[in-house]
Image: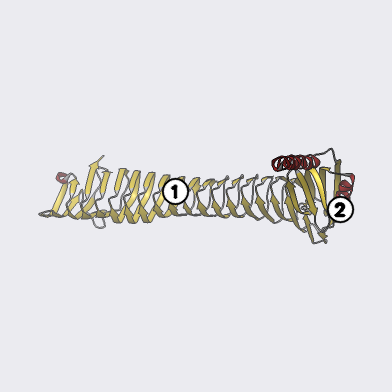
């Protein structure tokens, strides 16, 4: 008997739950209505808009006026719920003056769905029941207004903007026109697309940004993609990101696990870890790196402070100046002026062609250097090496001094015609493999 009662109670509980679930999805009362707010403002008004789960279009115009239109498409549980919601929205007041307007379209404190029963608690008002609720917005603002936009879970279209812009997005998609003033961006899990922009200050996370030409850029990013055309000065702090530029001014790029690609840059400062940098044309490069891959078509000066297990490929390079490197591989198609390796360890340097070299100085341990020199190139050669592995044409040299004791070699020679201030070639270290060929 007790078992039968328990069974009956279980059935009743299930029926009650189903009834409550169906109650949340009943026919209900439909509310489809457009609401409008208009404010007279200054042309350079400060306009703050907080947007939540509402697709939005922002236009700019030449009127000293802000017009905001919000369309609600909702199905409420009852006529009373529909009436309450309608009256509540109609009575909404937003902070406004001629110099400042602040609109927040999230007019509820909470939305809940429990066992199919959906409720919304309006700010400062009662709770209403609904089965469907959607909003969309459209607004017109003065073209010189200063826009401060905060948004979540929305798709937004924005026209051309002339005033200052601040954007804070979360899981949004924003498509904009021209930004003719400075812009500040904070974004997570979002996509932003613009045409051209001025100076940008950004902090992004798992976000994609695309634009045409921009001004200067200062950005902190993680797990993001940033692709633009030409840019001014660039300052990047990146983690596991991908950056693509056209032509830029000076670049400072501090990163881990990231990619940087550009057509042309000014002075470039790199502090990289496990990164890939590909730049077609660059002026001077100052570099700190571990586990990096670097490709340059043309570079004037490559200055490496510290490097560890890096790979370098350069088509045309003026000077290569390395303070400290370990396990690096350097492939240089054409070296014009000088090579200075202050402290190398198990590095490999390959130079296919040289120009009018002024100086080559290599110091280290277990270093491999292979270099092709012009057959008419004259230079002063000095070596002080323990365990040398030299493949050089001594017969074409005027050897002034050569002392080999056990595993140590000291050598001085002149290749070609001796002259005051002639180029010098100096090798010092331990277990150094030097190959010099002539073209």
Task: Give residue 200's position: percent from left, percent from top.
Answer: 61, 54
Which of the two residues, 357 or 324, is positioned nearer the viewer here?
Answer: 324
Can residue 83 be seen here? yes
Kindly indicate whether the residue at mark 2 contacts the one at mark 1 (C-beta within 8 angstroms).
no
SS state under label 2: helix
How packed mark 1 is, by other alpha carbons closer than 10 Å (few <14, some 14-19, many 20 or more), is many
Residue that sits furthest to the front in the current view: 1
Label 2 sits on residue: 88
Which of the two residues, 86 or 71, is positioned nearer the viewer here?
Answer: 86
Task: Give residue 344's position: percent from left, percent from top.
Answer: 29, 54
* 4, above or below 111, in the image: above
Residue that sits furthest to the top in the current view: 27
How packed mark 2 is, by other alpha carbons closer than 10 Å (few <14, some 14-19, many 20 or more), is some
Can residue 60 be seen here? no
Q: Is residue 81 left or right of residue 115?
A: right
**Marks 1 and 2, how far apart in space?**
55 Å
Q: Residue at x 88, y 50 (%)?
A: 84
Task: Give residue 68's position: percent from left, percent from top.
Answer: 82, 50
Quarter location, residue 384: bottom left
Q: Is residue 339 left or right of residue 390?
A: right
Q: Is residue 114 left or right of residue 125?
A: left
Task: Give residue 327's position: percent from left, percent from top.
Answer: 31, 50
The mark closer to the camera, 1 or 2, is 2
Which of the two residues, 278 or 285, is positioned nearer the viewer here?
Answer: 278
Q: Where's the C terminus, which quadrant?
A: top left
Numbered mark located on residue 275 in the image: 1
Quarter location, residue 163: bottom right
Q: Residue at x 18, y 47 (%)?
A: 389
Q: Is residue 252 left or right of residue 30?
A: left
* 73, above or below 184, in the image: above
SS state under label 1: loop
Going from the N terminus, do you reach mark 1 or mark 2 first? 2
């Amino acid at each position: 008997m007790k078992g039968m009662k328990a069974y009956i109670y279980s059935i009743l509980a299930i029926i009650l739950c189903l009834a409550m679930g169906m109650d949340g999805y009943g026919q209900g009362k439909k509310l489809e209505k457009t609401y409008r707010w208009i404010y007279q403002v200054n042309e350079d008004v400060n306009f703050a808009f907080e947007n939540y789960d509402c697709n939005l279009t922002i236009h700019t115009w030449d009127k000293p006026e802000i017009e905001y239109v919000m369309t609600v498409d909702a199905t409420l549980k009852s006529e009373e719920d529909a009436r309450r919601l309608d009256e509540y929205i109609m009575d909404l007041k937003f902070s406004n003056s001629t110099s400042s307007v602040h609109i927040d379209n999230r007019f509820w404190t909470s939305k809940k769905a429990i066992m199919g029963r959906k409720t919304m608690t309006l700010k400062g008002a009662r709770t209403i029941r609904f089965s469907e609720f959607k909003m969309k917005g459209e607004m017109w603002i003065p073209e010189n207004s200063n826009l401060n936009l905060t948004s979540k879970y929305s798709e937004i279209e924005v026209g051309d903007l002339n005033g200052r812009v601040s954007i804070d997005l979360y899981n949004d998609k924003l498509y904009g026109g021209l930004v003719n003033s400075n812009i500040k961006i904070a974004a997570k899990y979002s996509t932003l697309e613009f045409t051209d922009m001025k100076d940008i200050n950004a902090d992004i996370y798992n976000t994609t940004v695309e634009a045409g030409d921009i001004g200067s850029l200062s950005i902190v990013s993680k797990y993001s993609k940033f692709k633009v055309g030409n840019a001014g000065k660039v300052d990047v702090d990146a983690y596991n990101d991908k950056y693509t530029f056209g032509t830029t001014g000076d670049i400072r790029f501090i990163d881990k696990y990231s990619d940087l690609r550009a057509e042309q840059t000014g002075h470039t400062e790199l502090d990289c870890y496990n990164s890939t940098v590909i730049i077609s044309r660059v002026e001077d490069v100052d570099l700190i790196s571990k586990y990096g891959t670097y490709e340059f078509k043309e570079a004037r000066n490559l200055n490496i402070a510290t490097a560890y297990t890096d790979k370098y490929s350069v088509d045309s390079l003026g000077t290569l100046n390395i303070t400290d490197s370990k396990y690096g591989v350097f492939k240089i198609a054409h070296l014009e002026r000088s090579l200075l390796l202050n402290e190398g360890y198990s590095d490999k340097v390959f130079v296919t062609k040289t120009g009018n070299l002024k100086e080559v100085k290599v110091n280290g341990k277990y270093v491999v250097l292979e270099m092709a020199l012009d057959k008419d190139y004259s230079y002063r050669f000095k070596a002080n090496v323990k365990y040398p592995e030299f493949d050089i044409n001594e017969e074409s040299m005027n050897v002034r001094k050569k002392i080999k004791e056990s595993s140590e070699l000291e050598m001085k020679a002149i290749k070609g015609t001796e002259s005051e201030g002639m180029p010098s070639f100096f090798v010092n270290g331990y277990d150094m493999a030097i190959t010099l060929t002539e073209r």
